[in-house]
Amino acid sequence: MNAEPAPRAPGARRRAWRALLIAALAAGTLLAADGILTIVWQEPVTAYMQHRRQTDLQRDLARLDARYAQTGAPATAVAPAASADSAAGELRRRTRRSALSLLHARDAGQALGRLEIPAIGLKTVMVESTTGGALRRGPGHYRGTVLPGLDGTVGIAGHRTTYGAPFRHVDELRAGSRIMLRMPYGSFTYRVTGSRITTPDDASSLRSRAGTQRLVLTACHPLYSAAKRIVVSARLVSEAPRA
């Protein structure tokens, strides 16, 4: 007759339970830390992922800048006798052509330009499209809206709590706050005119208005919720085409 196996030592069971308890406490601590960081700052894991993607976008944008530096020059030089108005008009026309070409040249998630908002300490690369994948890389340009240098509305969306939370503090922008878009073909400065809260399906703020050059930033509102949208509107106050 075979002998029955010896019962497991109580000490071994205690060590196993202690290990499980420590693992559970560690997991709970990490989850709590993640939640606290998300509330007071941003979600740390996706923030790290977005930081790495922004590094790739910086390289993508550098290549785009170099391409426009080579191809952006006018086909013929402006004659010395030409008036300053003629030279300025040529620069504006070239800016418009460059904006139109870039509008149709970038795929979703590719770099478009740099977005800077001094009032909230934001400097980031923005990308084409507002798909989920694109917005994980940076603020995204709404397809169907224009680019700086063209008449109409430039629309940009961004996250507020995840993937770097670039638009976390857009609710702090006030009338007069500066927003800069640095494109491969020129730099454009806007001043905030106001903000409003609306519903996710309200796209009226993105419609272009004849004879105006506007910028609209949108993000989920309030924090940690997608129930509504905050819309920040701004108007163009200056531009510096790439010479």
Image (cartoon, grey):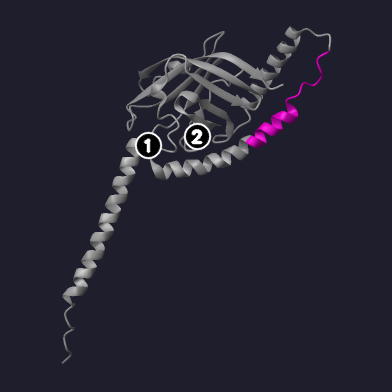
Binning the other alpha carbons within 10 Å of mark 1 as few (below 14), some (14 to 19) or many (20 upward) gives some
- Locate the C terminus by quadrant: top right
Q: Amino acid at mark 1?
A: Trp
Percent across and percent down for residue 139 are 49, 31
Which residue is depicted at the point 70% across and 32% down? 67
169 vs 4, left or right, is right
- Mark 2 vs 1, N-terminal side: 1
Residue to which mark 2 is pinned = 138
- Locate the N terminus by quadrant: bottom left
Percent across and percent down for residue 23 are 28, 59
Task: Single out the mark in the foreground, 2 or 1.
Answer: 1
Percent across and percent down for residue 11 are 19, 74
Quarter of image, res 62: top right
183 vs 223, left or right, is right
Specify the segment rendered in magenta: 62-79
* Residue 76 included in the magenta stretch of the image: yes
Residue 207 numbered mark, or none: none
Q: Amino acid at mark 2?
A: Gly
Residue to which mark 1 is pinned = 41
Binning the other alpha carbons within 10 Å of mark 2 as few (below 14), some (14 to 19) or many (20 upward) gives many
| SS assignment at label 2 | loop
Which residue is depicted at the point 50% across and 15% down? 191
Visible in this render: residue 204? yes
Quarter of image, res 83: top right
Question: Of all residues shown, which one is farthest toward the bottom?
Answer: 1
Visible in this render: residue 201? no
| SS assignment at label 1 | loop
Viewer-nearest residue: 74 or 179: 179
